[in-house]
Image (spheres, helix red, strand yellow):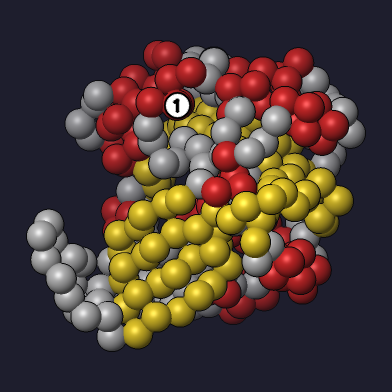
Amino acid sequence: MKILNFGSLNLDYTYSVDHIVKEGETISSLGVQTNLGGKGFNQSVALARAGKEVFHAGLVGEGGQLFFEACNKYGINTKYMNTVLGRSGHTIIQVDKNGQNSIVLYGGANQKITKDYVNKVLNDFSKGDIIILQNEINELPYIIDEAFKREMTIVLNPSPMDEKINACNLKKVSIFILNETEGQQLTLATDANGILDAMQRRFPASRIMLTLGKDGCIFRSGRKTVSQKAFSVDAVDTTAAGDTFTGFFIAGLVDELPIKDVLCTATKASALAVQKEGAAQSIPTMEEVERFRP
């Protein structure tokens, strides 16, 4: 079984602010950092830090060499990463004094994926291999279709949730990983149980992982529902919390651990991540997660 993350690679420009800027308001930043991120990259880092071999497929532009260097550092296989002309994808992130964030995303190289590139990558993967996807790259419907043809296990984190998700055949998704807001947008349900019920009706063959922030998370597979409470910590920056959870959650599934243990470990990893600034650099190792005593 091989793990492929076909996802975004973003340069994150993170501004520390007293509060998230309001419409028509101008405020001064208390500091700024440039970090490597993107939901795809963050999730690959989390998988690698959870002890899994992961192949990353994605495109970078100007400044992209930093990602190759970082992947080598974290142990992420870059065989399927390419460089294109133009700017790399990037984000402008505001982080307030309570650790909450607001993000503006520019696609850049992440939006230059071609069908030919998709085919060249997926031709090396087959039945039983895992592919992890988010909604920060183009050609997502095509990638899902081609992965399904190859009988891969398709894991989708539909973030950021927008109209492009509607172009995808979501019945081909094996596992959904989504937060409450994304669940509400996808199902129009207004609470966790309603989201899970609606998702199960629409996608009866899929497993659903619903994260609820400070209220923990709930996993639904067929008639089985398992929940996990969040751990109370002092949050500094929540930027990569969801991506950290995703990586450790998938790692636990690959190891075929009991789902209760998988959720506990992923929740611990996420709790550790929010206590540090930045995205990828905030993601803990499996050893740090195992030592964590909330």
Toward the bottom, the furthest residue is 30
Question: Which percent across, then down, holds residue 6?
Answer: 68, 41
Residue at the spot 61% in from the left edge and 77% down from the top edge: 288
Q: Quadrant of the C terminus?
A: bottom left
Q: Farthest residue toward the left?
A: 24
Q: Residue at x 28, y 32 (%)?
A: 184
Q: Residue at x 82, y 35 (%)?
A: 121
| Element at label 1 | helix
Q: Position of residue 274 (x, y in %)?
A: 42, 71
Residue found at the very far front of the displayed protein: 85
Mark 1 residue crowding within 10 angstroms, few (<14) / some (14–19) / many (20+): some
Q: Quadrant of residue 98?
A: bottom left
Amino acid type at image mark 1: Lys
Depth check: give the residue in front, 115 or 264: 115
Query: Label 1: which residue?
Result: 164
The answer to whether residue 52 is above or below residue 31 is above
Residue 33 lies in quadrant: bottom left
Judge left or right: residue 132 versus residue 92: right
The location of residue 173, given as percent across then percent down, is: 58, 24
In the rendered view of the protein, which quadrant contains the N terminus? top right
Can residue 246 be seen?
no
Give above or below for 192 relative to 80: above
Is 57 left, or right, of 235 in this rendering? Answer: right
